Image: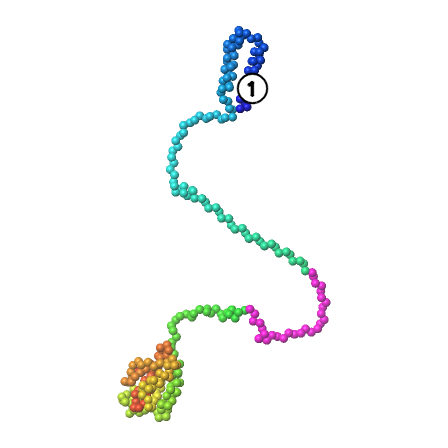
């Protein structure tokens, strides 16, 4: 625009110069015709008009030649790869800031050095009595912490159950037998019955030769008692002690009973022999054969 304005001012100057010159020239018809029909005058006017008509903008860039657009070849796109590329990478996790270290504790002021005290006189020191065993403090050590070696506190290894020892139950039976039949037991005063007292003539199976059977541990003669009464007395005496009599079979055509403890273990066997007006009680450690 600035250059166009300069050209217009230049052309205006020439134009007014021509007008000023024409005023001082003696104008006549012949002279005007010469001026108007002078070829250079028309050339100058044409050039000036052409410059005024043509737009001139030096700041506008030159228009580049338009080229026909070139068709670009289509490139296949892998959708899976695009999905993988489009997935944003997660931002890195910043580590938590380290905990601020506590401020250093202020230095303790220097303690004044105490003056040396004068040496005490050589008086005898009192001797403290030795603490007795009851006065010794136990401290904070719990009693449960005292180790008992490396013995584990778990359950003992499971193996075969211990073998049953019937001697305890047998002793219990013998110890209470005299008290249960104190008024009926005549073994100590009269002795054992003879062969004529046996109803079924089976005396040799219980008292061979009139003596206690070698396989029996003890034999008692209960006077004026039937086998049923003897059994009831035995049950009443030993059931509270955890012992019971259970009928198992017969021996010598007489009832045979098992003496069992609370766990059902057999301690021994008992035969109740039916005699005339009495009963013979025979104790067997093992089943008689």
Work out whether residue 249 can be spotted: yes
Question: Is there any visible trace of residue 215 in the rendered image?
Answer: no
Task: Identify the residue shown where x is 49% and y is 18%.
Answer: 50
Residue 3, percent across and down?
Answer: 54, 22
Colour convention: rainbow
Residue 93's place in the image compared with 169, above or below, is above
The residue to which callout 1 is attached is 9
Quadrant of the rendered image containing residue 82? top left
Q: Quadrant of residue 160?
A: bottom left
- Name the residue at the top extreme: 30
Q: What is the secondary structure assignment of the residue under circle 1?
A: helix
Which residues fall within the magenta stretch? 112-140
Q: Position of residue 118 (x, y in %)?
A: 72, 67
Q: Nearer the viewer, residue 228 or 269?
A: 228
Image check: 213 left or right of 6?
A: left
Q: Reply yes or no: does residue 157 show up in magenta.
A: no
């Amino acid at each position: 625009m600035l250059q166009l304005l300069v050209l217009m001012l230049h052309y205006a100057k020439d134009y007014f110069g021509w007008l000023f010159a024409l005023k001082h020239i003696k104008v006549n018809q012949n002279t005007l015709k010469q001026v108007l029909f002078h070829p250079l005058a028309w050339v100058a006017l044409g050039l000036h008009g052409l410059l005024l008509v043509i737009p001139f903008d030096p700041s506008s860039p030159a228009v580049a030649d338009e080229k026909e657009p070139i068709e670009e070849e289509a490139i296949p796109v892998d959708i899976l790869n695009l999905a993988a590329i489009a997935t944003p990478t997660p931002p890195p996790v910043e580590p938590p800031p380290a905990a601020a270290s506590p401020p250093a504790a202020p230095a303790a002021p220097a303690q004044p050095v105490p003056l040396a005290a004068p040496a005490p006189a050589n008086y005898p020191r009192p001797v403290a009595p030795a603490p007795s065993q009851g006065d010794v403090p136990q401290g904070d050590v719990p009693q449960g912490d005292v180790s008992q070696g490396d013995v584990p506190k778990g359950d003992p290894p499971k193996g075969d159950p211990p073998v049953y020892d019937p001697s305890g139950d047998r002793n219990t039976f013998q110890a209470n037998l005299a008290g249960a039949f104190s008024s009926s037991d005549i073994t100590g005063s009269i002795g054992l019955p003879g062969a004529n007292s046996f109803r079924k003539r089976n005396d040799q199976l219980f008292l061979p030769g009139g003596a206690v059977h070698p396989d029996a541990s003890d034999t008692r003669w209960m006077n004026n008692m039937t086998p049923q009464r003897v059994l009831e007395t035995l049950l009443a005496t030993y059931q509270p002690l955890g012992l019971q009599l259970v009928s198992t079979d017969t021996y010598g055509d007489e009832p045979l009973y098992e003496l069992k403890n609370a766990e059902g273990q057999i301690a021994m066997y008992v035969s109740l022999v039916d005699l005339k007006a009495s009963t013979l009680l025979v104790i067997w450690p093992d089943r008689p054969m």
